[in-house]
Every structure is written in C-alpha cells, then in structure tokens.
C-alpha cells in the first residue's frame, strides 16, 4: 500500500525517530477476533452457489478460474500506480482477447513485465495454498521477490527531491518508510529495527490454533491488515498483502481475493482499522470475496459458451443496443437503466477491439411491453430492446435477441435489478446497493463476462444458420 509523502505545504522529510515512536503495532489475532465477526450466513449463500457450479461443471473449472485469477493479478499493480487501467481494460487482459499484448504495452513499457510477475506470484500463492502448510517469513519474502521480479527501482523522497533507488527483492526494508500524508499527518509503519520481530510475530499469529480454526474471511482480513501495518518491504507491500490474503480464500473456495483499482472503500476501510474499527475492514474483505465468487459464477456460465474469439473467426458483427430511457420514476428504474447502459457501453467497447467484416448487417428495434417474469417485479420502460445480426446474401440468416430490464416493486438496498435476455433465457442481476449511485467495478466486470457470452452465442448461432443455408444450396 502506498501513501503520498507530500503535505499540502510541500514535501516534508520525516524525523525517523519521531515517526518510529508513533508506530502502533498490529493487534494480536485474539484481539482482532474480539473486535469483529464475519457474516457467515451471507458467505455461505454465495459459497454454496459456487460449490454447486463446481460440482456440476468440473471440466470448465480451469478455464473459468484462469480468467478470475488474472483480474486481481492485473489490478494489484494498477492500485499501486504502476500503470493505468480502466473499467473495461482489466477484463480485456483477463479474457486475453485479440491483441491484448499490444494493448498492455500501451499502458507503459514495463506494464506487461510487471503483470507477468504479478500473475506468477498468484500462481505461487495458489500452489502454496493447496499445500495447507503454515505461512513462514521465508515464504513471504519469496512472495515479495516473485511479485516484484520485474521492478528494479522504487521512488524515495530525499532532501534533494525524488530519487529512484534499487529495490531489494525478498529482503526486509533497510530504511524507514514512514510517510507524510496529504493532510500533513504522519503515518508510521514498523521501525526498521523492529521489522524482523514484527514479521516473526505475524507468522506466529498465523500459526495459532485460533487462527487455523477461524473463518477464511477473518484469516484473510487479519493477514492483509497485519502485513500492511508492518510494511516490511521498501516497496510492494500492498501487492504482497493482497496476494497473502488470497491464500485463505484460495484454501476455502479456490478463488483469489478480488480487490480492484476502482474499489473506493479499500483505503477508508484500512484507515478505519488503524483507528480500531476492524469490523469495517472485515466487512470489506467479505464483500470483495463475494464479488470474486459472483465473478467466478458468471465466468463458469460464460465458459459453457463458445469463446468470443472463436465466434468472431466464423462471423463477426456489431452489437448495438438502443439506449434505455433515462427519465424514470424512481431509484430502482434509474438503477436498471444505468445497468443497461453500462451493458451497452461495455459490449461496444469489447467489439471495438476487433476488425469487422462486411458480410454482417445489424439492426435494433423495440418490441411491445412485456410482463416481468419474476414475481414482485415490473419491466422498466415502455418497450423491450431487440437487436438482430444478419449474414449477407447468398446465405442470408438472422438471429434476434430481446432484452428487458426488470426491477422490484418494493425497492430495497439488497433487492436485485436484472437484465433479462428473453430467448434464449438468460439473466444478469445486481443489487440496488451495487448500482447506486453507479455500478461498482465488480458489477462492470461481471457484466463484461456476461456480455462476452451473449455475443459469442449469438454469432455462433448465426454462423450455424448460414452454414445450414449453404448446405441446402449444394
């Protein structure tokens, strides 16, 4: 985790002795447990869903988890400011769509190498997690070495300005890394001379019977927070903490912890824990683990469809949806329209990545209002949206898809807003709280996966229909 060391008045050079004295050691795991709980019922609802999918679709597990694994591996570097990203680019990398290597290169000359190191680190974490052995200092140092493999230097504030110094990989810090934050306050990490002892204490806490018996979310939250509190390395502490936290979610449900660049609650939750409110950080980690599970569910479902690239090799088309009416009666309507607009934008962004042939024509239309198919729901807007993709003569075929947005009549924060594809039946859903004031980064990510699946299925069906017409004319 990195903090700026510039105050409103300009750069300050810290007095190391004063900053050392301000260090507040991380709590013991027993203290952490006494201050927080995990909503295990909420966890089990989602964990059971992914367990069921895993049992029903074991052959698709590697493909689905490969996508999910790449998401945190990319965004962990973006969180640290190593390269920029945006709401659709993360999925572009994760799905490995056409020309992603060149797109990554556009993010900076070092972006691909950094990403590959981070991906290697998450493989390292997954391999370790399956062994069910305790976390040791040597393993954490090796994790730092792997995740920072492609980073040779780091920025340091000195009396003469910012300098780039060699990054010692796999070694504890040699110089203080306390910082002055934007408000001028000092945030102190572990003093250099205390760092080995604090890291030893951390690993001892991770070996206790109480920790071993604890809920995986509690384990993940504590391990992440404690490592960040020590800040044992010159740089890369946030990346190491997020990877370490993933050990315990991997062991529980074979998923990494999904913390994204757009997660605005991340730093405030850490700061709340610094002030003693560890429950807020535990709740944040639970929310992010559920986000990962939901992305995995959507990726499982998408894995059943032909890949987007395979479908585009047969027949590529543009998928344009009519903008939903933005003038609606209430919050639920606005949330539904916002979700549908994001769906449309993400789909167009994905299709912009490929060259389109001239053998496809596209159209959009509206249909008369339909009835909501979920009890207690209503359809947003006066009409449903229809799109059609058509192949050119002499093998003219057409595929239609009809969409409607449904919202609950009794809108509650945890009530679901959904986009329904009517034929073939398929649903994407998100809670109102995830869509207000705008869709979260995790929702956008899951929606992109769903969009990819629908595009691939429609193009594959169109290709099959055109091929059938070809066979008839032979």
Image (tube, helix red, strand yellow):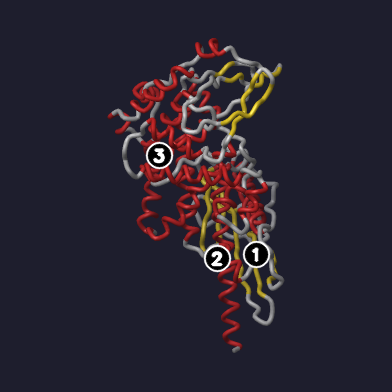
Query: Which x, y percent locates residue 3?
Result: 59, 26
Q: Is residue 57 above or below residue 224?
A: below
Label 3 crowding class (10 Å Cα cut-off): few <14, some 14-19, many 20+?
Answer: many
Task: Name the residue that disc number 1 marks.
Answer: 387
- What's the mark number on residue 457? 2
Task: Name the residue that disc number 3 marks.
Answer: 247
Q: Secondary structure at mark 3?
A: helix
Label 2 crowding class (10 Å Cα cut-off): few <14, some 14-19, many 20+?
Answer: many
Residue at the location (66% across, 54% down)?
349
- The residue nearer to you, when weighing 6 against 233, is 233
116 sits to left or right of 183:
left
Name of the residue lying farthest toward the bottom: 474
Q: Secondary structure at mark 1?
A: strand
- The residue nearer to you, when weighing 274 against 53, is 274
Q: Is residue 214 above or below residue 333?
A: above
Query: Which x, y percent locates residue 171?
Result: 47, 29
Disc 2 vs disc 3: Cβ atoms closer than 8 Å?
no
Q: Please tell me which of labels 1 and 2 falls first in the chain.
A: 1
Q: Quadrant of residue 165?
A: top right
Q: Nearer the viewer, mark 2 or mark 3?
A: 3
């Amino acid at each position: 985790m990195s903090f700026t060391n510039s105050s409103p008045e300009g750069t300050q050079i810290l007095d190391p002795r004063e900053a050392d004295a301000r260090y507040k050691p991380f709590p013991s795991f027993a203290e952490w447990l006494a201050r927080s709980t995990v909503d295990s019922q909420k966890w089990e609802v989602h964990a059971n869903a992914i367990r069921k999918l895993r049992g029903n679709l074991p052959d698709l597990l590697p493909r689905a988890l490969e996508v999910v694994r790449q998401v945190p591996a990319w965004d962990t570097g973006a969180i640290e400011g190593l390269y920029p990203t945006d709401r659709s680019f993360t999925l572009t990398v994760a799905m490995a769509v056409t020309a992603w290597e060149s797109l990554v290169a556009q993010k900076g000359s070092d972006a691909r190498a950094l990403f590959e190191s981070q991906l290697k680190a998450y493989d390292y974490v997954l391999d370790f997690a399956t062994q069910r052995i305790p976390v040791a200092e040597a393993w954490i140092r090796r994790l730092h070495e792997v995740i920072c493999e492609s980073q040779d230097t780091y920025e340091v504030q000195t009396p003469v300005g910012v300098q780039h110094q060699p990054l010692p990989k796999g070694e504890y810090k040699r110089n203080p890394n306390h910082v002055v934050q934007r408000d001028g306050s000092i945030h102190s990490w572990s003093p250099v001379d205390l760092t080995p002892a604090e890291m030893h204490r951390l690993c001892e806490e991770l070996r206790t019977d109480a920790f071993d018996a604890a809920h995986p979310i509690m384990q993940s939250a504590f391990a992440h927070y404690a490592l960040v509190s020590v800040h044992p390395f010159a740089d890369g502490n946030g990346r190491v903490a997020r990877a370490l936290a993933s050990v315990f979610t991997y062991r529980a449900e074979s998923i990494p912890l999904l913390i994204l660049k757009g997660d605005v609650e991340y730093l405030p939750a850490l700061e709340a824990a610094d002030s003693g409110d560890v429950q807020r950080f535990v709740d944040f980690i639970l929310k992010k683990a559920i986000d990962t599970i939901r992305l995995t569910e959507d990726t499982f479902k998408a894995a059943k469809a032909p890949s987007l690239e395979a479908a585009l090799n047969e027949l590529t088309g543009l998928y344009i949806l009519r903008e939903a009416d933005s003038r609606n009666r209430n919050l639920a309507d606005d949330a539904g329209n916002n979700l549908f607009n994001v769906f449309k934008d993400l789909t167009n962004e994905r299709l912009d990545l490929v060259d389109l042939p001239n053998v496809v024509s596209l159209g959009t239309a509206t249909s008369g209002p339909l009835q909501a198919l979920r009890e207690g729901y209503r359809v947003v807007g006066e009409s449903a949206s229809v799109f059609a993709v058509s192949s050119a003569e002499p093998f003219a075929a057409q595929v239609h898809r009809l969409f409607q947005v449904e919202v609950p009549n009794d809108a509650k924060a945890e009530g679901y807003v959904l986009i329904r594809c009517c034929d073939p039946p398929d649903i994407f859903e998100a809670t109102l709280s995830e869509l207000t004031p705008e869709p979260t980064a995790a929702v956008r990510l899951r929606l992109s996966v769903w969009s990819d699946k629908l595009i691939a299925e429609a193009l594959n069906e169109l290709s099959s229909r055109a091929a059938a017409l070809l066979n008839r004319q032979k």
